[in-house]
Amino acid sequence: GARFAKWRNVLQLDPESKLPSDLAIADTVHTLALYASICQSEKIVPIVEPEIVPNGKHDINYCAAVTEKVLKAQFAALEEHHIYLPGCLLKPNMVKNGIDGPRADHDTVAKLTVETLLKTVPKALPGIFFLSGETALDEDNEEVATINLSTMNKNFKGQMPWHLSFSYGKALQKTCIATWLGKTENNEVAQKALKARAHANYDAVMGTYVAGTCASIGTDGNVKQAAGPY
């Protein structure tokens, strides 16, 4: 089977401090490009993850502008390092508002995310696998991530040259973990919860997920390091 690796570099947003700086962006994208080059030299598929974390009060438009800037720089760096794009995958953030900023709806997140990707990601790249990203503690991060992905694939069906899918952590596992609690007697119900959310995200890849049809522990499962900023 395929062998792959993943490297994640994080960038912070802060309009007042003009973050991320050009130096931070350059360091991020060239580090990831060097990693990708090493991977491909060893016949390993690199998953490139330049993550812009949503901590802060900025609006979604600032995130869109910075994400576009970062992704343009990222693919320029990959080209400089002679990365074979059909043998590479991207794991980006969705374009979203800051956790404490004015909240954008799912259609706006989908629109700005896909438009940003269409401006920056070459057609040769076969797949984009989103990280779920952080949400405010009064939002259900599992459901939000699933709905956002489904909205993209529904609203932009046939308009994207690459496969749009998910590589979620917290937004795939929260209900499972909160149900399991490390107790053997909870194994079966926790496994069912994980399978249900995985299938919900499969539906999201098809653009057919119906909001609320996958059981979630909701905001009751939101704790620090599980759904909030880190």
Image (spheres, helix red, strand yellow):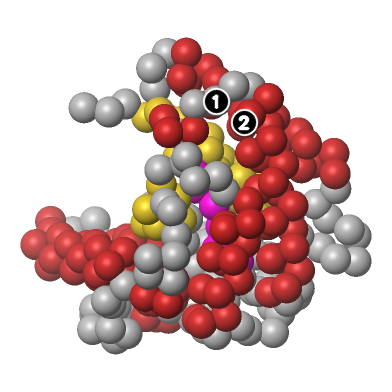
Q: Residue 108: where, in percent of width, then height?
A: 57, 80
Q: Which mark is residue 36?
A: none
Q: Which residue corresponds to mark 2?
A: 78
Query: Visible in this render: residue 149?
Result: no
Placement of the N terminus among the 4 image quadrants = top left
203 vs 181, nearest the viewer: 203
Secondary element under disc 1, as helix, strand or loop, is: loop
Mark-to-mark CA distance, 1 and 2: 5 Å
Disc on the earlier residue, 1 or 2: 2
Instruction: Describe residue 62's horizontal placement relative to residue 168 as left or right.
Output: right
Image quadrant where residue 149 sits: bottom left
Identify the amino acid type marked 2: Leu
Give the residues in magenta.
Answer: 90-95
Q: Residue 40: where, in percent of width, then height?
A: 46, 19
Q: Is residue 91 one of those drawn in magenta?
A: yes
Q: Residues within 10 Å of mark 1 (few under 14, many from 20)?
A: many
Residue under the image location 37 percent in, 53 percent down: 163
Predominant secondary structure, magenta span: loop
Placement of 221 over or under 172, stated as above or below: below
Q: Which residue corresponds to mark 1?
A: 83
Marks 1 and 2 in Cβ contact (< 8 Å): yes
Instruction: Describe residue 148's horizontal placement relative to residue 28 as left or right.
Output: left
Identify the amino acid type marked 1: Ile
Q: Residue 193: where, in percent of width, then height?
A: 19, 68
Name the residue furthest right: 17
